[in-house]
Amino acid sequence: MGVLGYTILTLCVLGAVLAAVLYFVAQKFKVEEDPRIDEVEKMLPGANCGGCGFAGCRGMAEALVKNDDISALYCPVGGGDVMKAVADYLGKAAPEREPQVAVVRCAGSCANRPRTNQFDGAPSCAVVAATYGGETGCTFGCLGKGDCTAVCEFGAITMNSETGLPEVDDEKCTACGACVKACPKGVIELRKKFPKSRKVYVSCVNKDKGGVARKSCKAACIGCGKCAKVCPFGAITVENNLAFIDSTKCRLCRKCVVECPTGAIVEVGFPARKPAEEGEKPAAKPATKPAAPATEKAAAPAVEKPAAEPKNE
Amino acid sequence: MLKTFPIGGIHPADNKKWSAGAAIQRFALPESVSIPLSQHIGAPAVACVAKGDKVLAGQVIATAGGFVSSNIHSSVSGTVTAVDTIVGANGLRVPAVTIKVEGDEWVEGVDLSDTLISECNLEPKAIVEKIAAAGIVGMGGATFPTQVKLSVPPGKSAEYLIINGVECEPYLTADYRLMLEKGEELLVGVRILARALGVKKSFVGVENNKPDAIARLQKLVGSATDVEIVPLKVQYPQGGEKQLIAAVTGRQVPSGALPIDTGCVVQNVGTAYAVYEAVQKNKPLVERIVTVTGSAMQKPANLLVRIGTPISSLLAHCGGLPEGGVKVIGGGPMMGRAMSNIEAPVMKGSSGVLVLRSEETLRGEEGDCIRCAKCVDACPMGLEPYLLANVSKQKMYDMAEQHFIFDCIECGCCTYTCPSNLPLLDYLRLGKAEVMKIMRARKA
Amino acid sequence: MENKMIISPAPHVHGPNKTQRLMLDVLIALVPALVVSTVVYGLRVLALTLFSVCCCLLFEWFIQRYMLRGKLTINNLSAVVTGVLLAFNLPVNIPLWMVAIGALVAIGVAKMTFGGLGKNIFNPALVGRVFMLIAFPVAMTTFPEAADAISGATPLTMAKEALKNGVPVAEVMQSVSIKDMFIGVESGSIGEISALALLLGGLYLLWRRVITWHIPVAVLGSMGIFSLITWLIAPEAYMSPLFHLMGGGAMLGAWFMATDYVTSPMTPKGSIIFGVGVGVITMLVRLWGAYPEGMSFAILIMNSVVPLLDKYILPKRFGAPAKK
């Protein structure tokens, strides 16, 4: 009993002494900090993805508290709700931005864009881009080594082994922009998020002249400009043999989709068209992957399920 | 004990046997040439001809686009069919002038005879001007404009001229054949370069695996003391500028400094020969010796080729590509660049075209780093490649900078020696480019 | 497309180094010691070694396949090397179930918990050995009599006991023969009895450039100097340097255990510091510690210093500014 008693006593005394030491040290070295920073940090999603431009959520919280005008700060992961909550708490005007989603602008699947050579270096898009034009005739499109999937903190972007292209899960994508930065070819773009994950976009970034582009990829934009002419909202521009649809101007009328001779303009998330006007476009189900051009039709359904299911709570 | 550089190095099989015995052979004029406007380090040249123009061989078709840049001459006579872009060896488009070959007429004043002219009494300044006008760049592959290297910055002075006849890249024999067959012209070129720099002493460094080239040059030098032939122990990457200076003089170029800081200027033997032709014969740089080799080539050769000739025609001349998977490399196997487009033209820096069959070149499966330290032992710059590759991959650029990633000369010793087949240099190169960018931004 | 073009960044050729080949060279280098031991102790040596190797392979395969779910790694032979080295550190008559536990600790705890080859901090075989030494002290220190050895104890144990009891060195030396220790007919763990065989293996590794000279020379050199000093000061109380270099795990440790790639420093200078550390700690344990042999502990202790050495001891850099 004596041993046990001493043990307990010693430990208690030791604990008390150390607690006192800790307390004084904490007091002595306390860093005065605006307590609101902690509060704001708690409100932020805590993903530390860097999408706001800061290294982590803490940096963003500090900036939100310190700056009077926070209109330039935006957390893409938390979105409008979080920004509003933070702004209300701090008594500042909430920055507003339309929700965005990452879109892979390349339809150069194995079927559309035959490989002309075999890359044998480190499996990284950055290494490929520093070495040469890429494994296909197209030197602009996706290099297919998955740098974008490696940087995504949210598991929202995955490589499709059938097509060799990355696919974005709109539900998980927070538009943090990490993949946009990681892609050495600038294939991925943040576009305005429409309801039901609908999108209409040019799924090509090839700036070669029409003939050259077409030769290397069946789904290439040839820069013919038909889409720009047909667009009632002036959302489409053609520059360097490449059409671009400004998602902030686009109203999803889909006239361009019908007009495009190569199927480079893609519509996603719309109900099936009537057979008469369906043409070559596949009917994509709502909230699924980018509907690929006709040649990829067979592959598409097979990969939809696995990409949508994992890690969704 | 033969001299060599002090740290690291590897001993790859030299494989020069395939083409070493093939005498330099003049390659037939192609039907048309495409001459890229950027064949050198620095600003691209600016085209000064237009579609439809008639040009003569040796005529300037593009002028230097800046201080670090170089003139470009037509290598053939004929009609300009396009001033546009062509697909380069790496698949990317590059601006180029395409000329349809008609006959072989040269601009006036070019001496095409074989007569040796060894006298040169030009002032240094005039020599440098002539070299600049002739569009000469470093022929070893780095393609740094020669006139810039010969312009010693104020406050610094050149003590030694070191001529690089090392050709440490396996397979390549262009420099070796040049030293054997054009030794006299080469030495005149060396003395002209020495005159331009105002140095009293020149060294020609040659690796000991080329004993006949060493003997030949030594015989030509005779009892002269201004040029010394230095046999060197075979070790890659001895042809690296810093390694060569260390091997010959024992001086180490300090980290972040230039070779001139040790009083040395290094020029390739090919450059010295081009200087001879430009200064003594008024012939600009429009052709070069290209080794076409590889164990799978039927007729390996050393060809004297006009700039702009499609590489595919050289390959066809040497027996065509073998069946199956091949890697076609512009340059040697250690630092050359693999080509995805063999229709690309021969350029000023094309020292060789090497064809490797897939089994000779395919990388093995990547394993885990076993910390064997072989990359550390092999690195000629005394760096830690395993660490640098790793931090580059993780994008930890400040750490990479702390470990001197900017000193990397991209020689490839680390990847060559790694028992786990890790692509160390692939990542290291990315990290180095990124760190250099950050450092430049900081300076600006 | 008649030809498939292959593209990669430079370099386009690769040297002869392969992990598997390096490991194979280590195994080849261990063959002489195995042969001597088999001659001295009989076929059980082979059975024990084989059993240890099989256990290590099995554990590595199982953990890699079902727990780490990575690609197969047993064909790089590193587990075989661990298995052989573990067996070499055991007495010949140890029960096999103990060997299995040792192998489990070596592979499972010391190697795979860190993520497998290349990521472990401590030498797996030594962790296995030290675990067994602590868990089964009697079985691990009971050595059968070798061919014509006069006692079942190892020379180190015997010398330690004798010196502790005040027996003068000269008398101790009557019962051990340095020559026998060199050739391998004194008793000890199966792999460490013959200094000669181990030395041959070590030289083979040097010749094949599998290892560099730094670590073995630093370990043996520092042990030699350390024991030389004590021996010169008090020749009647301390054994001679030759005795220490030939005895126990000195050779096995210096050539095969301390030079383990994964757990040794990356730079030549670091390797020398590491080696000297191993040598000095070994001698401290041997002369004044509780155990007769300290090689295992010394290597494990120095293993833990390796990350520090790698951080602060950098290789000699080309063109580095001279230090003031």
Image: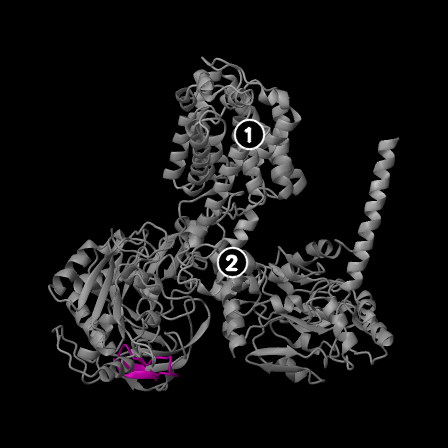
Distance from the alpha carbon under mark 2 to that under mark 1: 34 Å
- The magenta-colored residue range is B57-79
Numbered label tally: 2
**Residue assigned mark 1:** C86
**Mark 1: secondary structure:** helix
Give the residue at x 76% y 54%.
Answer: A311
User: What amino acid is found at the position of numbered circle 1 in the picture?
Assistant: Leu
Q: Is B69 in the magenta?
A: yes
Check the residue under mark 1 and report the chain it is in.
Answer: C
User: Depth check: A104 or B160 in front?
Assistant: B160
The secondary structure that dominates the magenta segment is loop
Residue at (69%, 82%) from the top-left corner?
A235
On residue B308, the disc is none
The correct choice, above or below, for B137 with respect to B381 in the image is below
Q: Quadrant of residue A103?
A: bottom right
Give the image location of residue A240, x and y in percent.
55, 80
In the rendered image, which quarter contains the N terminus of chain C? bottom left
Above or below, A275 against B390 in this view is below
* C126 relative position to C220: left or right: right
Drawn side of residue C35 relative to residue C116, left or right: left
Q: Quadrant of the C terminus of chain C?
A: bottom left
Q: Position of residue C71 (x, y in %)?
A: 59, 43
Same chain, labels 2 and 1: no
Instruction: Say if residue A286 shows up in the picture.
Output: no
Q: Element type at marker 2?
A: helix
Query: What amino acid is at disc 2?
Result: Leu
Q: Position of residue A45 (x, y in %)?
A: 78, 64
The correct choice, above or below, for A251 with respect to C324 in the image is below
Which quadrant of the structure image shows residue B314?
A: bottom left
Residue to which mark 2 is pinned: B388
Q: Alpha-carbon neighbours of circle 2 within 10 Å: few (<14), some, or many (≥20)?
A: many
Q: Is residue A107 left or right of residue B366?
A: right
